């Protein structure tokens, strides 16, 4: 079954035949977490770095912000049977909204990545791989059975 | 096989960051030794079996370059895998050290960069399979 993750959304699965996919990752982050032994995985599509700009909105939808969405992703995966020490974490997105990084006034993509970096360090996790930055849009998918993460961008597809 | 690793840096904070990264890298760790300069490191190496040394260059008492020179002159440590973790910017100085068999990780580094350098020097990460953990995209050091 194919599950589509919208913007500010998350899906978790423990079904080996499932594929979770999210589209249009610009400055947003797609964060994929997978336990290859338990075959549990999740994909999160977050928009903004910190929930402090609108805590009420973060309470209604934690998947809007990196600092509230990523902990939810970890907790839900662990509650579904994943083990923290087996988790593979991959990230894609975090692009500039302008052609040149210095023209991107708000630098949302970069700030999203910085907040994620802090959360990973705090939670004792390292990234398995990442495909971030630039000024492209990406589609990210996660196969629950294999843990394979694929990035599609500009008509090209690659494994992450 | 558990790896005994020596971390040589005059900053205790940097040593703590490197040691935390080692623990997160899921390496089979044995003993982790620390030294604040080259002279202390040589003493540790005299008394303990070390499989890998992570060495800063700019340190008081004895710097990393002098320490590596002494290691390479000693038959017991001439083949010791060494990763230099330093802010050193001089390409010529880096080249000299790399000719002595050391790898180089530039500060500031991401934990993944250090993990991959360790796996490469220990033969656990194929250079050709650069997809895993290697830096891609527009932010080389996010």
Image (cartoon, rainbow, N blue to C red):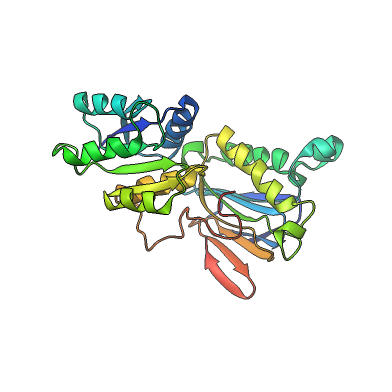
Q: Among all residues in the image, which is located at the extreme bottom?
A: A155
Residue at 71% x, 58% y is: A101
Residue B41 or residue A136, whichever sits in front: B41
Residue at 70%, 39% (x, y): give it.
A67
Q: Nearer the viewer, residue A72 or B25?
A: B25
The x, y position of residue A87, in whole percent, is 50, 43
The residue at 73%/66% (across/down) is A99
State which quadrant residue B44 falls in: top left
Q: Residue B118 appears at what percent x and percent y?
A: 36, 45
Which of the 4 image quarters holds residue A119?
top right
Q: Residue at 27%, 43% (x, y): give it.
A: B81
Residue located farthest toward the left when viewing the structure as drawn: B75
Q: Is residue B33 visible?
A: yes
Q: Where does residue B102 sit, x and y in percent of width and height?
A: 31, 47
Q: Is residue A152 left or right of residue B21?
A: right
Quadrant that contains the N terminus of chain A: bottom right
Q: Position of residue A45 (x, y in %)?
A: 70, 52
């Amino acid at each position: 079954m194919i599950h589509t993750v919208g913007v500010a959304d998350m899906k978790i699965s423990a079904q080996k035949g499932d594929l979770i996919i999210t589209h249009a990752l610009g400055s947003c982050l797609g964060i994929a977490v997978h336990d290859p032994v338990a075959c549990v995985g999740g994909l999160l599509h977050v928009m903004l770095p910190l929930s402090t700009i609108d805590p009420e909105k973060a309470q209604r939808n934690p998947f809007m912000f990196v600092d509230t969405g990523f902990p939810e992703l970890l907790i839900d995966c662990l509650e579904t049977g994943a083990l923290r020490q087996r988790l593979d974490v991959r990230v894609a997105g975090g692009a500039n909204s302008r052609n040149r990084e210095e023209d991107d006034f708000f630098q949302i993509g970069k700030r999203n990545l910085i907040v994620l970096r802090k959360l990973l360090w705090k939670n004792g996790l390292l990234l398995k791989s990442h495909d971030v930055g630039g000024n492209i849009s990406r589609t990210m998918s996660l196969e629950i059975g294999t843990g394979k993460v694929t990035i599609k961008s500009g008509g090209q597809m690659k494994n992450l | 096989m558990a790896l005994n690793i020596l971390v040589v840096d005059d900053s205790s904070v940097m040593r703590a960051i490197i040691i935390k990264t080692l623990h997160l890298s899921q390496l089979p760790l044995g003993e982790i030794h620390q030294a604040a300069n080259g002279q202390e490191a040589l003493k540790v190496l005299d008394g303990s079996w070390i499989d890998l040394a992570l060495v800063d260059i700019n340190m008081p008492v004895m710097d990393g370059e002098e320490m590596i020179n002494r290691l390479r002159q000693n038959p017991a440590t001439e083949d010791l895998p060494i990763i230099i973790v330093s802010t050193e910017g001089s390409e010529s100085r880096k080249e000299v050290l790399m000719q002595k068999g050391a790898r180089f990780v530039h500060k500031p580094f991401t934990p993944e960069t250090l993990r991959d350098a360790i796996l490469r020097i220990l033969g656990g990460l194929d250079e050709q399979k650069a997809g895993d953990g290697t830096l891609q995209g527009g932010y080389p050091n996010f």
